[in-house]
Each structure stands twice: as C-alpha cells, then as structure tokens.
Amino acid sequence: MTAPTRTAPDHGSRSARSSQELIRAEESSLAHNYHPLPVVVARAEGVWVEDVEGRRYLDMLAGYSALNFGHRHPELIAAAHRQLDELTLTSRAFHNDRLAGFAEGLAELTGLGMVLPMNTGAEAVESAIKVARKWAYEVKGVAPDQATIVVAADNFHGRTTTIVSFSSDPTAREGFGPFAPGFRVVPYNDLAAMEAAIDETTAAVLIEPIQGEAGVIIPDDGYLRGVRELTRRTGVLFIADEIQSGLGRTGTTLAVDHESVRPDVLTLGKALGGGIVPVSAVVADREVLGVLRPGEHGSTFGGNPLSAAVGTAVVDLLRTGEFQRRAAELGEVLGDGLARLTGKGVVGYRCRGLWAGVDVDPALGTGREVSERLMGEGILVKDTHGSTIRLAPPLTITREELESSLAALEKVLG
C-alpha cells in the first residue's frame, strides 16, 4: 500500500516548519526518553493521521490502546466540548456534577462496586498497590510493613520507581535504584511458581491478563481461572492490570472476560480517556476500596469534571457492545492474515481481538527497521523487544483498511 499524498491544508504556525525541522527541535529541547518514528503528526481522524507535509498514514498502534475508538471520535469530542463550556476542574476538595455518573457507569460496566479515579495508568497501579497493602494490614491481619505482592516476570505496569522495582526489563531498571521491597517476581503463566511465592504476608497477585509490552503474550487457557481460584483459596487479592488489554481491545469488555473471571481489583486507563484526556481508575468492591479514608490517598486532577465527562461517554460507547463485537470479528481477520504470513517473514504471532504481537524473522530486520519500512508504506506500528512489532489498530478500523495493512506487512517482509 502506498501512502496517499495530498496538499497539506493551511494550519497556520503548526505546519510552518517541516517534519525534519520539528524533529531536530524536539531532539534539541526534549529529554530523550523516547525514540519515536520519524513522522510528525499534525492532524488525525478515525484511523488516519496526517503529517505536517500532508502525507497520510493508517494508525495501527492507536496510542498503545489509548485510541481504541479512533482519533477524535465524534461522540467523545462532543462530550469534551460540552464540558469545556461548563467546568473543567474543582479538585476533590469539592464535589462536581459529573463524577457520580462516571463512577456509577464504570462500576456497572465492570461488575465491581467502587471506583477510585486517577489520571495515568501508572497512578492506577500505584494506587492499587497502596490499597492492597492497606487491605492486607486492616482486613487480612498482615504484620505492619510486611505485606508482599506477587508479580510476573516480563511485566509492564508503568515506570514509577515503585513499579520498576519489580520490572525484569533492564532498560526500565538500570540506574534507577534503590528499589522498593515487598515484591516477589515469578514466571508468567506458571501457577505452581505463583502458589509457591504466596505466604501469610501476601496481600495480592498483580498480573496483566495479556502482557502487552512483552509482545502481546497470551497465557494458556485456564491460567486466569487458576489465578482466581488460587488467590481465593489462599486469601489474597487478585489485581488484573487491564490498562492496555481492557475496554474492548481483545473482543470483550475486559480480557479476563475470556475466562469469565472476576478479579478483586481492576486497573484501567488509556482508552478510558478516549484519546482526549488522561483518565485512569482502580475499580474494586467496597470491601477492598473501602479501606481508604479521607487524606490517605488523593489526586488533584483525578476525577475532574472534564475527565469524568469523557470517561462517561467512553462507558456509554462500550455499553452497546459494538466495539467489543468489532474487535472480535476483525480479530479473526487479523489472525487469519498473520497465519498466512507465517513462514513468509513472520516466524510467530499472538493475536487476541484487535491486538497482536508479530515476531519477524530477525534476518529481515529488527522490529524498529520493520516499523520504519511500514511507515514508508503509510502504516504506523511500533516495535517492542528484538524483532517483534505490535499491531493494535483503533476498533473503528474497517476490514479493507485492516487487510491493506496486512498487505503492506507482506510487502515489506517480501
């Protein structure tokens, strides 16, 4: 697929400089904590983005699932515009008229009873860790300051100092110690190892139902049910990090729904803000989140009226089931297409809904190199470790657009 080109519209000062000039300016003035592809996006709508020169690209990354509903979804934009004309921030020092509806809707959607609104995914995970520890001391009876949490190797839960303390990724960890104690790392998809790590100090098990950053690693059938049974039997909380996997991405509202599992605690983010504002949440039953009391945890922007309005609109979109169905149906197209490419440059893949990790033959290039070649064909993806790329298009993508991206992948691997 060749990227369509058209004359760039006049956007004033935003496109007064070329892509290369803007990239050089970023490299000079921004910290180098990212290595983005050399494209400078100026406009976007639906599944398409446009750079400052007017070149168009099909977005097959969707902001790491933050854009599940596409760029500038009209219902989400309308909700944001309405709220911008009314009220944007009160802090939690006061009530606001949008927060109750957001919390009620999200609790109903997830089947859990109480919501703790935050901003970013990492904040949600940090908050869940605090809640689990507090629950362990007040409800389970763990000795003060002795609570432990079992996590999985190759996890990605964020980049705060606490979270990288239990990361097994050297890039995330090296140079950022000393690290927080209280975490036990076991292999992913290994129930026996998890059970061996649980003892009387264990507050919770924290896992991703599907490991995103690791390359969309899908556990064996029955693993999540096994985690649920194990945590219930041993009296510890099951925290499911659905920040990337949740809210329609895998063909169900939550990835745990594939095994009909109900965790004790959910962390949500990314798509919850509709690609407009950062919104995250910890969702749990009252017996768990009820351990928090005024002053023990908070966030100035968490639960602000603008975020609550957008988050409510996101919940309303998911209530229809349309996006979950689209992800499931088009996920079959994606999986079939990757199966056809296996042995033709693809050496392995994992696909659940509209989310896939694709392992490219290392002889054909690194994941970064393949991503750059796809960019040349008008397709935007992002690499992860080694020669693996991730595909996570907006759930609004059409079958034709999805098939054209697979054709582009076949071309660059040929």
Image (tube, rainbow, N blue to C red):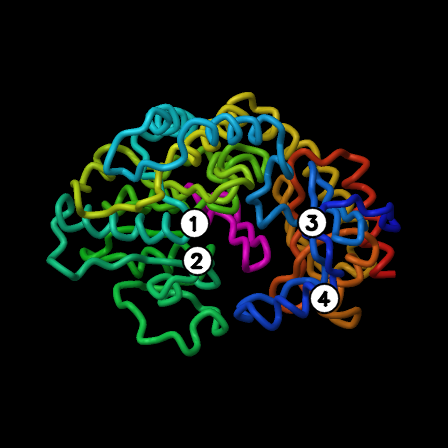
Say few, some or many: other residues with alpha carbon within 10 Å of mark 4 (under 14 / 14 to 19 / 20 or more).
few
Q: CA distance from mark 4 to mark 1?
A: 32 Å
Q: What label sits on residue 398 in the rendered view?
A: none
Which residue is tagged 3? Answer: 42
Q: Judging from the image, what secondary structure is the residue with disc 3 in? A: strand
Can residue 94 be seen at all in this image of the molecule? yes
Magenta stretch in the rendered image: 208-225
Residue beneath disc 1: 121
Q: Decide: few, some or many residues near mark 1? Use Cα within 10 Å; few <14, some 14-19, many ≥20.
A: many
Looking at numbered disc 4 in the image, what kind of residue is underneath it? Glu
Q: Earlier in the sequence, mark 3 or mark 2?
A: 3
**Kind of residue sitting beneath label 2:** Gly
- Would residue 48 appear left or right of 188 to someone viewing this image? right
Q: CA distance from mark 3 to mark 1?
A: 25 Å
Where residue 193 sits in the image (x, y, percent)?
37, 60
Find out whether residue 89 is within the magenta segment: no
